[in-house]
């Protein structure tokens, strides 16, 4: 597995976002495959039922900023 380093938080967010887009996103509530990226909250929103889904696996983690 190749280790990728990111110079800042935004580059990491951008990487996770593009990876998810390539894999495809399916709403776990209604099954729709069309989503919109909400830049302010860094979440995906389903275009059908408006269900919010986090953008990364680290979303909501309790890690410190140090």
Image (spheres, grey):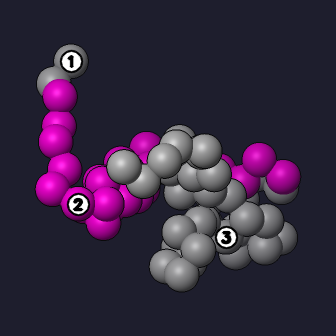
- The secondary element bearing badge 3 is classed as strand
The one of 41 and 48 positioned closer to us in this rendering: 41
Q: CA distance from mark 1 to mark 2?
A: 21 Å
Give yes or no for contact between labels 1 and 3 (Cβ–Cβ under 8 Å): no
Between discs 1 and 3, the one toward the N terminus: 1
Percent across and percent down for residue 42 are 53, 69
Residue at the (42%, 53%) spot, across then down: 65
In the image, residue 5 sits, relative to residue 48, either above or below, namely above
Q: CA distance from mark 1 to mark 3?
A: 30 Å
Q: Which residue position holds label 2? A: 8
Graded by Cα atoms within 10 Å as few (under 14), some (14 to 19) or many (20 or more), the crowding at tag 2 reads few
Q: Which mark lies nearer to you, 1 or 3?
A: 1
Give yes or no for contact between labels 1 and 2 (Cβ–Cβ under 8 Å): no
In the displayed structure image, the side of residue 6 where residue 49 appears, left or right: right
Query: Which stretch did the figure color magenta?
Result: 3-29
Give yes or no for contact between labels 3 and 2 (Cβ–Cβ under 8 Å): no
The quarter holding residue 9 reads bottom left
Q: Is residue 23 magenta?
A: yes
Q: Which residue position holds label 3? A: 45
The one of 12 and 21 positioned closer to us in this rendering: 12
Q: Which residue position holds label 1? A: 1
The one of 66 and 19 positioned closer to us in this rendering: 66
Percent across and percent down for residue 31 are 76, 51
Between discs 3 and 2, the one toward the N terminus: 2
């Amino acid at each position: 597995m190749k280790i990728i380093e990111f110079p800042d938080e935004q580059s990491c967010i951008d990487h996770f976002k593009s990876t998810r887009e390539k894999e495809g996103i399916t709403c776990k509530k209604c099954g729709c495959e069309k989503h919109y990226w909400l830049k302010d909250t860094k979440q995906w929103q389903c275009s059908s039922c408006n269900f919010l889904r986090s953008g990364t696996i680290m979303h909501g983690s309790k890690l410190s900023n140090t």
